């Protein structure tokens, strides 16, 4: 399996896109992963599920706008250069 | 940060003596002077100076031997002089700008800590990487809350060995492919980027798992890069044995370096991960899930032989 740095960047963009697409009300609350269900455990350590939900929410918040730019650039490059 | 810049500017004041005795652990000096002093024995230092002075001595005499005309040519043309000085000032400005930009993303102080090594440390660390079973004390020593540099503490992770080992591995891969007449420059680049990508993936997975389990250890990103780069030493050893002794030597060396590397990783990371404070501030000791931390350490250790085999088997057919 020969990786190039370009394939790593592609994989990273795809993963971040996948995380950013998870909708808060339509999907995550339905399966019990919404942010309103993560408040709880003060003092005790948060646990894996809470950490994961926080991670998803923060990735969505931070990467929404840069992802628009990165995706547009990717689309243009792939259209031009295949 | 301002404090750090000031201490950098003062590093060569009042520290004229070479920091000598390697075994002195009583009172290490401040981090700045240790980072920049040469702790190898006095003889190599004097050899270095002896190498440098002939260069300086040969410079002016040759200029003089060209006679007055050479010197006149150099200084008689004010335009060339002015251009040279303008160019050097431009270069200095460019250097300052690059330094400023780089220090915004990567903390240069932290990076310099990882490259503050000397030959004694490198030799001992390589020995420990290949034969860690007799090493007794795996704790990283601290000095007033800052970890000691690799020069003073053989357990401290460094980035010099992984970088050099990575480059040596790429060169060895080129040699191995050339012996089998499968060499071309693109393959070399492909090998390099594959190895680099695997290191990046491993560091990202480690960071993610440490974050998810709220392990508040003092493992920074550079520490993880260092620990994950130590496997290149095992890879070099394996590929060398495979080239010299054929397929049997390859598997024997693979088994040996896998066991040594697994032992090294488990012992080094066990101290840092398993005994770190959990996010529970009430101080009830280690976290409620110590077995998950053990799983992380075990998974990291088991990943090493897999990746060594994956990245080196195609070089030994």
Image: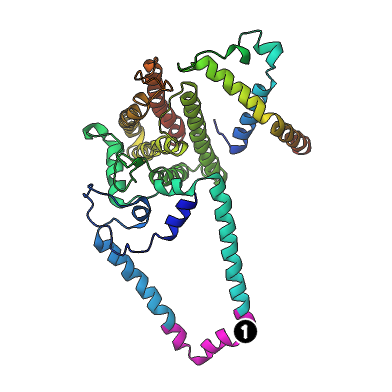
The picture places residue A13, in percent across and down from the top left corner, at 65, 30
Question: Is any atom of residue B162 visible in this view?
Answer: yes
Residue A14 makes an appearance in the image: no
Residue placed at 60% from the left, 61% from the top?
A: B94
Q: Nearer the viewer, residue B40 or B30?
A: B30
Q: Position of residue B178 (x, y in %)?
A: 47, 45
The quadrant where residue B153 appears: top left
State which quarter of the image contains the N terminus of chain A. Answer: top right
Q: Residues within 10 Å of mark 1 (few under 14, many from 20)?
A: few
Q: Is residue B78 left or right of residue A68?
A: left
- For disc 1, the marked residue is B78
Image height check: is B223 above or below B40? above
- Residue B91: x and y in percent read 58, 65
Q: Main secondary structure of the magenta part?
A: helix
Above or below residue B226? Residue B289 is above
Query: What segment is highlighted magenta in the picture?
Result: B61-81
Between B94 and B263, the one lying in front of the other is B94
In which chain is the residue bearing label 1?
A: B
* B89 sits to left or right of B277: right
Q: Quadrant of the C terminus of chain A?
A: top right
């Amino acid at each position: 399996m020969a990786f190039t740095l370009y394939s790593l960047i592609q994989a990273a963009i795809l993963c971040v896109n996948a995380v950013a697409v998870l909708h808060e009300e339509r999907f995550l609350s339905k399966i019990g992963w919404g942010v309103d269900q993560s408040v709880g455990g003060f003092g005790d350590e948060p646990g894996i599920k809470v950490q994961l939900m926080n991670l998803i929410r923060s990735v969505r918040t931070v990467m929404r706008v840069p992802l628009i730019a990165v995706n547009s650039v990717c689309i243009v490059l792939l259209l031009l250069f295949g | 940060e301002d404090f750090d810049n000031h201490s950098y500017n003062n590093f060569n004041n009042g520290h004229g003596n070479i920091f000598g005795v390697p075994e002195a652990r009583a009172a290490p000096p401040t981090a700045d002077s240790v980072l920049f002093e040469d702790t190898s024995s006095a003889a190599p230092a004097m050899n270095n100076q002896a190498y440098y002075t002939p260069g300086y001595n040969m410079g002016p005499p040759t200029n003089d031997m060209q006679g007055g005309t050479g010197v006149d040519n150099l200084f008689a043309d004010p335009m060339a002089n002015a251009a040279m000085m303008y160019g050097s000032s431009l270069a200095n400005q460019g250097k300052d700008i690059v330094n400023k930009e780089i220090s915004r993303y990567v903390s240069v102080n932290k990076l310099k800590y990882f490259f503050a090594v000397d030959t004694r440390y490198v030799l001992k660390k390589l020995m420990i990487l290949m034969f860690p079973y007799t090493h007794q004390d795996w704790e990283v020593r601290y000095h007033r809350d800052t970890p000691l540099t690799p020069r003073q503490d053989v357990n401290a992770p460094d980035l010099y060995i992984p970088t050099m080992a990575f480059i040596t591995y790429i060169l060895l891969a080129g040699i191995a492919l050339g012996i089998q007449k499968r060499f071309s420059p693109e393959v070399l680049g492909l090998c390099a980027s594959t190895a680099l990508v695997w290191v990046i993936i491993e560091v990202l997975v480690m960071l993610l798992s440490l974050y998810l389990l709220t392990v508040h250890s003092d493992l920074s990103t550079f520490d993880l890069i260092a620990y994950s780069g130590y496997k290149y030493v095992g890879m070099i050893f394996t590929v060398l044995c495979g080239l010299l002794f054929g397929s049997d030597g390859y598997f024997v060396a693979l088994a040996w370096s896998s066991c040594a590397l697994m032992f090294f990783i488990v012992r080094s990371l066990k101290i840092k991960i398993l005994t770190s404070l959990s996010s529970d501030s009430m101080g009830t000791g280690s976290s409620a899930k110590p077995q998950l931390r053990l799983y992380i350490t075990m998974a990291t250790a088991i990943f090493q032989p897999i990746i060594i085999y994956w990245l080196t088997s195609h070089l030994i057919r």
